[in-house]
Image (spheres, rainbow, N blue to C red):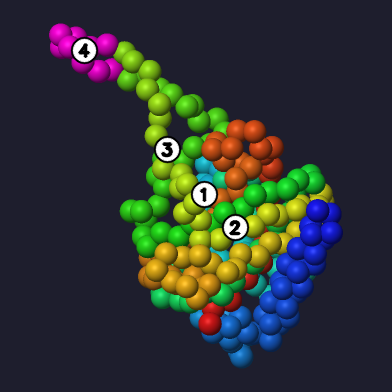
Amino acid sequence: MFGKRIARLVTVALSLVAMLSLTACFDLGTFGDENGEHKDYYDSFGEIAGLFDGGKHGYDLEDSVFNDYTVNEMDWEDEDDEVKSEEYVYLVIPFKRAMQIESIGMFVGTDTNVDLSVAAFYYPNESYAPAKIKYKSSPDTEIVTVKDDEGNDVEVEVEIVYDDPDPSLAVAETTLYTVAGDWTDFLLENFMQEGYEDGLLHTGDNGLLYIRIDNNSGLYPDLATCSFTFINLLIRAI
């Protein structure tokens, strides 16, 4: 078991090192940029959102999540652009055009050693995405008023139905083994998208990828929560 874990860590690390090397050459698959401006890359994605219990942060891709400074320094040049550490449940990546994505990598920073379960879900537009998310503080039931057989108002306790997708609908999954006080990377690849068998994630304009950190989701109350920040979103399209 320990050997498999180490092998997985090495594989992911080597994959992301390769991607970082490619960015230095301004090439993330079809996002090649000989001028070093990454314009095609930035134009292909919207604001990256982090949804957490009680709020939401939006991050500009160029300013906060991927640029030459973040790649070379693993830090932010301007503290105003820094990605805040939160117990994010979903990281949301909006797509602005049709793409065939081979892999999605990112670096995560935490103050604790913990195994994070990660699952990704694709939606063609916002109307399909989860609107009622179950956080760790979300109740399982609620009191509603209904009419009884005689037409009188009565209060009853009912189960709350949340919109979080079932794990079986994930297009990709992985486990992230964080190291306290350091950056740890993860890679999503070999996508299992309905209607496709090529291992790629096929996106369209207005499509969304919801990356769920199960540890912070109310669907998994027994998993330990974890605050984290993230940097260097590396998406390779072909």
Residue 235 % position (x, y): 58, 72
Of the image marks 4 and 2, the number of the one nearer the N terminus: 4
Q: Quadrant of residue 22?
A: bottom right
Residue 199 % position (x, y): 53, 72
Q: Amino acid at mark 2?
A: Glu
Do callouts 4 and 2 mark residues in contact (Cβ within 8 Å)?
Answer: no
Residue carrying label 2: 173
Q: Amino acid at mark 3?
A: Tyr
Q: Can the viewer see residue 22 in this picture?
A: yes
Q: Amino acid at mark 4?
A: Asp
Q: Residues within 10 Å of mark 1 (few under 14, many from 20)?
A: some
Of the image marks 1 and 4, the number of the one nearer the N terminus: 4
Do callouts 2 and 1 mark residues in contact (Cβ within 8 Å)?
Answer: yes
Of the image marks 1 and 3, the number of the one nearer the N terminus: 3
Distance in Å between CA atoms under marks 1 and 3:
14 Å
Distance in Å between CA atoms under marks 4 and 3:
26 Å
Residue carrying label 3: 162
Residue 148 — which label? 4
Residue 129 placement, left or right of 238: left
Mark 2, secondary structure of its residue: strand
Magenta span = 145-154
Of the image marks 3 and 2, the number of the one nearer the N terminus: 3
